[in-house]
Image (tube, helix red, strand yellow):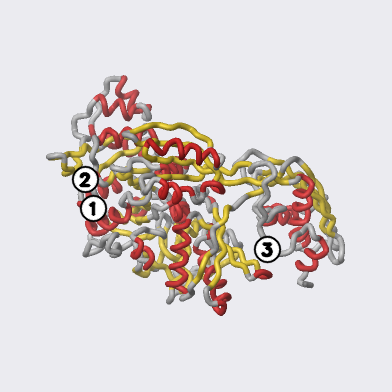
Amino acid sequence: MDYIKSIRNVGIVANIDAGKTTTTEHILYKSGKIKKLGNVDDGTAKTDYLAVERERGISVVAAATSFNWKNCTINLIDTPGHIDFASEVERSLRILDGAILIISAPDGVTPHTNVLFDALQKMKIPTLIFVNKMDMLNFPVEYVVESIRENLTDKIIQIQKPIFENYEFKWAENILRNDVSDDLIDVLSKYDDELLQKYLNNEKIGMEYIDGRLIKLVENSLMYPILFGSAQKDIGIKELMDAIVKYLPSPKGDISKPLSGVIFKVQRDKAMGKLSYVRIYDGQIRIRDLVHNFSKDKDEKVTQIRKINASSYSDIDILKAGDIAAVCGLDGHIGDILGTPSSVPPEHHIANSLLAVKIKPKNDDDYYKLVEALQILDEEDPLLNFRWIKELKELQINIMGTIQVEVIRRMIQERFSINVEFDKPGVIYKETPSKRGYGFVSYTMPKPCWAVVKLLIEPSERGSGLSVKSIVSADKILPRYQNDILRTLPEALQQGLYGWEVTDLKVTLVDGEDHVMHTHPQDFVVATPMAIMDGLFNTGVKLLEPILYFKITVPEEYAGKVINDLTQMRGVFDKTTIVKKNAIIEGEVPLSTSMDYPINLSIATKGHSQMITRFIRYDTCPDGFIAKRERIGVNPLDRAKYILSIRGAI
């Protein structure tokens, strides 16, 4: 399995404008992958291959490429930095074995950097921290390191020292020398019992041993090395590439085991049709193989396998454990598991679509063409959650921010030749049960059918989502029918009493009945939405709204006005500090009341303000507040009409 030891699956993540794409560009150039350096501002960067990316100078999709360095094949994922495209980052994190977290030296740790690092920690992805734009630093580098220590983690180790000449950043010097210092041992031994014991026993500790222990600590996400550089000036890039090979681990996997992989990205190609980006954990895939989609429970034939390098590709015959490639012939969706789920890591969510927006074609003749386009985009980004309310000819998508609206507008025009317009975005609310209660349905008429379901619905703690279970014996409801009920519940809860997703609840199947003669395979699938809606009607629901963390920086003289504004918006304050005649105000505020505030604040302060926000949770709306969403399909509470619609009678 030597080939797997020579692979690195690495992602570059960072806040917007930290220099991810520029760093990627210089890595590809230094490795010999590209012959000429591109530029983000000029729209010539290799991994910004969409027209909208070149025009705006930002990454909006994760771009996969690969290069060779020191006898290693490195699959590199350059992810978007803007929070509006965090869904692309979320899907990429799942398939990584290592990461480079880039921090802009002058900007330091931002709220979005915190979100990214929190995900890397929770998923235990070994990470290098690359402090970029050192040529723009106008204060001591110790402040940057201390910011990382205070805001991200104290499990950091500086393996380089930035060198300045006449206040100009020149290079980063390796400080892990042959002479092992007590300070170095002190830093590492906090997280390495073996090293500590060796030190306490006065055993000789050499640099080779220290290197091995540090590599182990990084692999186990117990230590995060810090490197310094300036991608724009090509300083520190080679050292970063060396660190990828040295510190970030190769994949774990076994080609001899049954296939285990996941689709993490879907893309449409004009010539090849649907491309499914696949990470293989165990086993292998060959051209013309019949691959089992575990999530869809169906087999599909592989017609082609491609190694993708941003906008170009090369064909290969086999995709082995540990590697990444695009596979043709699969009709799966993002998140679908191929083969067995045994080796696929769980998902970790950092992206939250908090706004919904209506979209329509400027030319009515393009309506059905737009429907098809949105179905394709929804397949490529499931968080768009495309909703088609056919009765009203209404099209809706979920978004994370206003920048995403402009990007989607441009993509639809570029890819599908449709000009569209959007309504003003609205907040996405959620519902949760007000109290404990039961839902019941006896679906035995009109025959032939027989499905009796009784559900216990209980509120659960905020942020817990949905949990389902059954305590019914197989004598009452056969296991396959119980599975139908539990499988249908999440879909049935996508629309509650007010049309919003229902969350933070426990649903237990407590009683029911099938019939040996009259029960048909889909009866419990039909009955479950009626039972759950009956239960929600009995429990009542409360609306939940998204709450944001905010950090506002304004000239000191505006602090009073800002605090008064935020109070009117139901804001809650955490702390206010004064730094160099600027007030820094932090706290929490509902999205619904603060959506337009960054623009209004900028106007009020003549551009001398900054408002940074990030989603933190959903919380209960004020008493008496009601917001309804148009329902798709017939409400199961209207039993007769619902059954007729399910049976295709209306």
Q: CA distance from mark 3 to mark 1?
A: 50 Å
Q: Which secondary structure, mark 1?
A: helix
Q: Is residue 538 above or below residue 523?
A: above
Q: CA distance from mark 3 to mark 2?
A: 54 Å
Q: Residues within 10 Å of mark 3 (few under 14, many from 20)?
A: some
620 left or right of 147?
Answer: right
Circle 3/circle 2 CB separation < 8 Å: no
Circle 1/circle 2 CB separation < 8 Å: yes
The residue that mark 2 highlights is 135
Q: Is residue 539 above or below residue 515?
A: above
Q: CA distance from mark 1 to mark 2?
A: 9 Å
Quarter of the image for residue 484 reads bottom right
Q: Position of residue 350 (x, y in %)?
A: 49, 48
Quarter of the image for residue 415 reads bottom left
Identify which residue is drawn at 57% across, 67% down. 299
Would residue 217 be seen by someone viewing this image from the given angle?
no
Mark 1 vs 2, N-terminal side:
2
Q: Which secondary structure, mark 2?
A: helix
Residue 232: mark: 1
User: Farthest residue toward the left?
Assistant: 166
Q: Amino acid at mark 1?
A: Gln
Q: Position of residue 171 (x, y in %)?
A: 18, 43
Would residue 44 be seen by someone viewing this image from the given angle?
yes
Identify which residue is drawn at 39% across, 40% down. 553
Q: Residues within 10 Å of mark 2 (few under 14, many from 20)?
A: many
Q: Amino acid at mark 2?
A: Asp
Q: Amino acid at mark 3?
A: Ile
Q: Position of residue 239 (x, y in %)?
A: 23, 46
The residue that mark 3 highlights is 632
Q: Which secondary structure, mark 3?
A: loop
Identify which residue is drawn at 80% across, 60% down. 638
